[in-house]
Amino acid sequence: MSLPTAHAQNVYGSSDHWMGSKLSAREQELRSIMSLNGDPSGSYHEVDSFPEGYNYGDEDEVIGAVGGVENKPRILLMGLRRSGKSSIQKVVFHKLSPNETLFLESTSKVVKDDINNSSFVQFQVWDFPGQIDFFDPTFDSEQIFGSCGSLIFVIDAQDDYRQALIRLHQTLTKAFQVNQNIKFEVFIHKVDGLSDDRKWEAQRDIQTKATCDLADAGLDGLLRPSFYLTSIYDHSIFEAFSRVVQKLIPQLPTLENLLNILVSNCGLEKAFLFDVVSKIYIATDSSPVDMLSYELCCDMIDVVIDVSCIYGDDVEACAYDQQSASIIKLSNGVILYLREVNRFLALVCLIREEVFERQGLIEYNFHCFRESIQQVFEVRRKTQGPLTSLGSYSDDN
Ligand SMILES: Nc1nc2c(ncn2[C@@H]2O[C@H](COP(=O)(O)OP(=O)(O)OP(=O)(O)O)[C@@H](O)[C@H]2O)c(=O)[nH]1
């Protein structure tokens, strides 16, 4: 699946040529990172080879050194019994088929899942039993909410959700008392069984009631949960989890800026930076995400990995490596383009066919992009030391 190798020399000219004329200071800064170590000629090694001196190193090097298990940022999954918490976790992170969740047993104690199986973003997902009692003396809220990054509250939209709303309010207020930095997320879940009208109605209703309850408690403006319509039977759960995880990535604005630059320089329709294992996108450019594009890109990752597993030369080798790249032409004149960024990340873009004729330019800019990503994490690692939570770094480094 690797792309043909080509030489970039003398094709692209100066790095100044990629940019539009009016650049903000921030863009200039990012673009100077993106230029190839200040080489204005744009000449560099083979397009399809890695930058000199580049290696994957160990996992910690790539993401900026992660602390021990207990130091990993926590995402809590809470909600009433049978709302779908364990199913979400198993489908997103353990590739369980949605139909198999029918056989999941009810969770009786907190299940801590360490998500670090070669995933770019490392964190823990804590799946709570539905019948949890905040007033139970054994429930240590300081310990549970204290170093939590995100709290996802799951509401079964197919059920009567009045009880869930009461529990949502209790959970949000309790967690907020302990930790005001938590990102609060509400998944209005199992919407696959609802018509479009009923989906929007459920969202409006739940959002209004939850916001009113918070206003009554004097917390409006202080505590602003985000609401998502989700289902394990389509890509909505991956999309929602992507947005939850993105909020915990301190480098997100930089990644988004780099993607914006890439999109504008190459004339791409859309670009996603994917965590290949989970198919969570950790960043995208600033144009709106439409579900169809996201689904196509997810499917493309599956196709590349599957083809690589089935037809790869070396059975021992990893299905996703430096050579992983793919171009798929769709019948509507759009091209899906996948390139490996590092061993956890892939860039997946949608490009119009006529734009793809300038493939050399795209290759060149992609190389700049890949180098910039490495530099972003390198800088973070050097300046801020080991990561103790996705949003903060330990002071003693
Ligand atoms: N239709 C539909 N059913 C779902 C969805 N997600 C989960 N379910 C079903 O909901 C039921 C309960 O799912 P669980 O994941 O066990 O729920 P839970 O919240 O972990 O339950 P407890 O462990 O008892 O707290 C299962 O039968 C799942 O198949 C969804 O998106 N759509």
Image: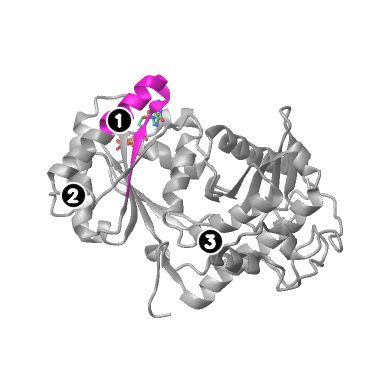
Q: Amino acid at mark 3?
A: Thr
Give the colour scheme shown.
one colour
Q: Residue 170 location, x and y as percent? A: 17, 44
In this view of the protein, can residue 131 be seen by the observer? no
**Whether residue 34 can be seen here:** yes
Q: Which residue in the protein does label 2 denote?
A: 219
Q: Dots 1 and 2: beta carbons under 8 Å?
A: no
Expressed as whole percent of the image width and height from the top left, the position of residue 4 reads: 85, 50
Looking at the image, is 235 positioned above or below residue 137? above
Q: Is residue 42 above or below residue 382?
A: above
Q: Nearer the viewer, residue 314 or 190?
A: 190
> In the image, is 226 to the left or to the right of 282?
left
Queried whether the magenta region covers residue 223, the answer comes back as no
User: How far apart are the alpha carbons under marks 3 and 2?
Assistant: 31 Å
Name the quadrant containing residue 107: top left
Q: Main secondary structure of the magenta part?
A: helix
**Magenta stretch in the rendered image:** 184-206
Which residue is painted at 72% across and 31% down in the image? Answer: 330
On residue 254, the disc is 3
Find numbered disc 3 in the image and state the secondary structure of the residue it sits on. Answer: helix
Q: Is mark 3 within 8 Å of ligand 1?
A: no
Looking at the rendering, the quadrant in which ligand 1 lies is top left
In reply to whether residue 201 is colored magenta, the answer given is yes
Q: Secondary structure at mark 2?
A: loop
**Residue at 29 percent of width and 59 percent of height:** 181
Q: Earlier in the sequence, mark 1 or mark 2?
A: 1
Mark 2 is on which residue type? Leu
